[in-house]
Amino acid sequence: MTALSTKSASAPDRKQLVDPATEWCDITPERAAEWLKLNTLNRPKKLQKIALYAADMKAGHWPVTGATICFGRSGRLLDGQNRLQAIVDSGATVRLLVVWGLDDDVFDVIDGGSRRTASDVLVIEGYEGWTAACGATAARIALNIMSGLLPYARTYSPQNIRRFVNDHPEIMSSVVFVESLPRRPAPFPHSAAAALHFFMAHRDASMADLLMTQLYRGDNMTAEDMVLRLRNNLLGKVQQKLMNSASDHTGAIAAVIRVWNSRRAGRSITHIGNAFARSGEEFPTIK
């Protein structure tokens, strides 16, 4: 990595950079404000963290460390927005190490003191907060089911979640669909509903919409309808605080799949207990 000796806090010609370059810069509030304009796709600012940083900077207590402000080859600010905003807010000039000319693709794996989550990465992709959070978990569930694993068996890196969403944009269409359903009371997590809707809609979109709508709204069903009975069973468990763990949610997901499979096959589950797994029974396949 090339070291630059200037304190000008101005970007070197990126076209001339073969390798990333580093530079110690005395960053004024005016310069920090200019650099923040290059923050085109970063995650939301951490206001509490910025306030703490700004207080230390204003008091002259900000230490010189190896923490960096990072820019990509495109000129985009990749890391350091909270420190730059704190400089602006404090009115102080702060000496920081700046890295120029990084590959823009490293953005997702940069850890600037607050690790980027899968939800953060989806916010950067343009999704709103609730949609991004729901989508990140829905993508995790879908990835596990596609891999033959239980819904919450594995976690995945933000890069893998983003790649899955980009390869399967329908997962976010399913998230948007379940976002229209009531938040409370919810028979099982919206993220799980979105993941199941994603798979089911590939088989029968209208039936998938109807099933999720009935589970969340309880409309247009007779007392004998297994979907209504499943909804009531799950809501009862939620009210009794029996739906708190990944194992509890996995059982609910499996029950929804069994009811879906029976409806698709034109059969009826005669007893609600048959929707739930018996000891040693494998997790069902969505048909």
Image (tube, rainbow, N blue to C red):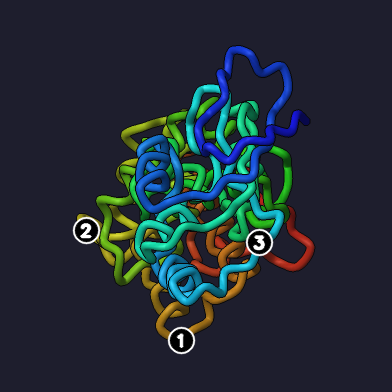
Dot 1 amino acid type: Gln
Q: Is residue 199 left or right of residue 212?
A: right
Between the C-alphas of marks 3 and 2, the distance is: 62 Å
x and y percent of residue 94 in the render? 52, 58
Q: Nearer the viewer, mark 3 or mark 2?
A: 3
Is disc 1 placed on a helix, strand or loop? Answer: loop
Q: Which mark is residue 33?
A: none
Q: Is residue 55 left or right of residue 109?
A: left
N-terminal-most mark, 1 or 3:
3
Outermost residue to the left: 220
Q: Residue at x 48, y 84 (%)?
A: 241
x and y percent of residue 155 in the render? 68, 52
- Inspect this view and state whether residue 107 appears: yes
Dot 1: within a 10 Å radius of its alpha carbon, few (fewer than 14), some, or many (20 or more) residues?
few
Q: Residue at x 38, y 66 (%)?
A: 90
Between the C-alphas of marks 2 and 1, the distance is: 23 Å
Q: Residue at x 49, y 54 (%)?
A: 192
Is disc 3 placed on a helix, strand or loop? Answer: loop
Picture quadrant of residue 67: bottom right
Task: Identify the residue position indicated by label 1 in the image.
Answer: 240
x and y percent of residue 134 in the render? 44, 53
Task: Identify the residue position indicated by label 2 in the image.
Answer: 219
Q: Residue at x 46, y 57 (%)?
A: 93
Is disc 2 placed on a helix, strand or loop? Answer: loop
x and y percent of residue 41 in the render? 42, 37
